[in-house]
Image (cartoon, rainbow, N blue to C red):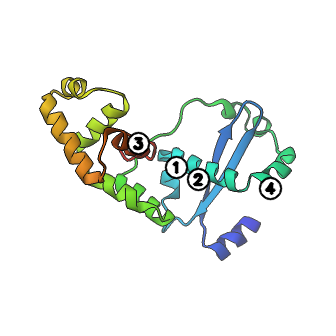
Amino acid sequence: MIRREAGKVLNTSMGVILIHKNETHVELFRFYGSNGTSALQSLYLNRPQLLKSFASHFKKELGSILTRVEHEAVSLIDMKGNDFFCKQPICPDISSDTLISYYKDLGIECEFEKAKKLSLRERQCLKLLIAEKSAKETAAILGLSSRTIEYYFENIKNKLGCWGKQELLAIARIFEEAGLL
């Protein structure tokens, strides 16, 4: 009943729970949104790392309060039984436009808008850069010449507004973590 009333006041019609297992305890994070205007359910099912990053930020900001209530935690194993130990995640794909929309709602879309400018080949090059492949190795994997790969990296740097390989690698890792590659 409280949830229903809160849903009316806050315009929420659905909720998802993020479960973070640790060796000694389990943390539950609840996120609520509106079916009509929120991508929350898709994000929860397809890109849980986004919600995890928000949960980490939340824990950091409210750590002192959370520490005080930690002793009141309930055993999730008792609540969920064998389902608690399920190893297979649900990971259908989510479009980059939906992710950009989500980031825009959070007010951090500026950097992620740049990811939309990248071609499929450029995204492949960045994935291989993250995997620590050289231009020569990337060329062999993609069936292209080393010069073509170097050309792709110059284009990527121009599109993302960065100068060096380390800066490019840092941005690529952020995009990868955010599910935009």
- Dot 3 corresponds to which residue? 170
Q: Earlier in the sequence, mark 3 or mark 4?
A: 4
In this view, the mark in front (2 or 3): 3
Name the side, left or right, on which 56 lies relative to 171.
right
- Dot 2 corresponds to which residue? 54
Q: Secondary structure at mark 2?
A: helix
Rounded to the nearest angstrom, the CA distance separating label 3 from label 4 is: 33 Å
Rounded to the nearest angstrom, the CA distance separating label 2 from label 1 is: 6 Å
- Dot 4 corresponds to which residue? 65
- Residues 114 and 83: in front is 114
**Mark 4: which amino acid?**
Ile
Residue contact between numbered discs 4 and 2, judged by CB atoms under 8 Å? no
Q: Earlier in the sequence, mark 1 or mark 4?
A: 1
Where is 143 relative to 178, above or below?
Answer: above
Name the side, left or right, on which 172 lies relative to 17.
left
Where is 118 relative to 77, above or below?
Answer: below
Q: Quadrant of residue 122?
A: top left
Residue contact between numbered discs 3 and 4, judged by CB atoms under 8 Å? no
**Mark 2: which amino acid?**
Phe
Q: Quadrant of residue 92?
A: top left
**Mark 1: which amino acid?**
Leu
Name the side, left or right, on which 65 lies relative to 45.
right
Q: Earlier in the sequence, mark 2 or mark 3?
A: 2
